[in-house]
Amino acid sequence: MPKYKILNYVKSCKISLFCSNGFSSSSNQTLTRSIRSESKAVVVGGGIVGLSTLYHLAKKGWSDVLLLERKELTSGSTWHAAGLLPIFNINYTIGQLHKYSVEMYQRLEKETGVDIGFRQCTNLRVACTNDRWDEYMYYRYCRHN
């Protein structure tokens, strides 16, 4: 997502964002350069976990939240992550988290009007042994229960 779109979205949620590199746009200098003396919550890190936390707090109506990022948003390990969300998973809870993530990425595009680059595709798994077949059938069971 372009940085100016992130800033506009953050500003619309009335949430403060501070990056030590002075990340800002001309219309948002005050927003990004000031740190409030008191906040209900402080989110440290502007990677996928920090931004997701900030997003979900904003969706819950929290406005007194501060995000701190050392460099630029998503410039750490999030930057080079593959972003794979396999719903075909051995753990039901992780599978549900992946399913929620897919739905959230689709919602983000509608909420922000920005193509975030999320592409849903399928995968093919081949079982060459009976043990692998049993494992895949277990995945299937987990997915549907």
Image (tube, grey):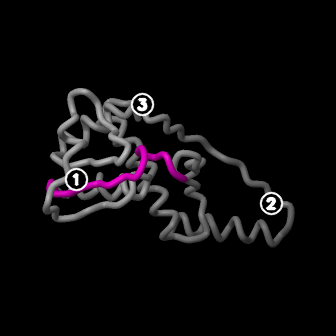
Q: Residue at x 72, y 70 (%)?
A: 135
**Picture layout, residue 99 above or below residue 25:** below
Distance of label 1 from label 3 (alpha carbons): 20 Å
In the image, residue 41 lies at what x, y percent? 22, 64
Q: The residue tagged with tag 3: helix, strand or loop? A: loop
Q: Is residue 61 left or right of residue 10?
A: left
In the image, residue 120 lies at what x, y percent? 54, 41
The stretch drawn in magenta includes residue 25: no
Q: Residue at x 55, y 57 (%)?
A: 87
**Picture layout, residue 104 above or below residue 144:** above
Depth check: 34 or 14 in front?
34
- The quarter in which the N terminus is drawn is top left
State yes or no: discs 2 and 3 in contact (Cβ < 8 Å).
no
Q: Which numbered marker is on residue 115?
A: 3
* Residue labelled with disc 1: 59
Distance of label 2 from label 3 (alpha carbons): 36 Å
Distance of label 1 from label 2 (alpha carbons): 42 Å
Kind of residue indicated by mark 2: Ala
Q: Which residues are magenta?
A: 62-77
> How many numbered dots are placed on residues in this image?
3
Kind of residue indicated by mark 1: Lys
Q: The residue tagged with tag 2: helix, strand or loop? A: loop
Q: Residue at x 54, y 64 (%)?
A: 143
Depth check: 122 or 113 in front?
113
**First-in-chain label (2 vs 3):** 3
Q: Quadrant of residue 50?
A: bottom left
**Picture layout, residue 87 above or below residue 90:** above
Q: Which numbered marker is on residue 127?
A: 2
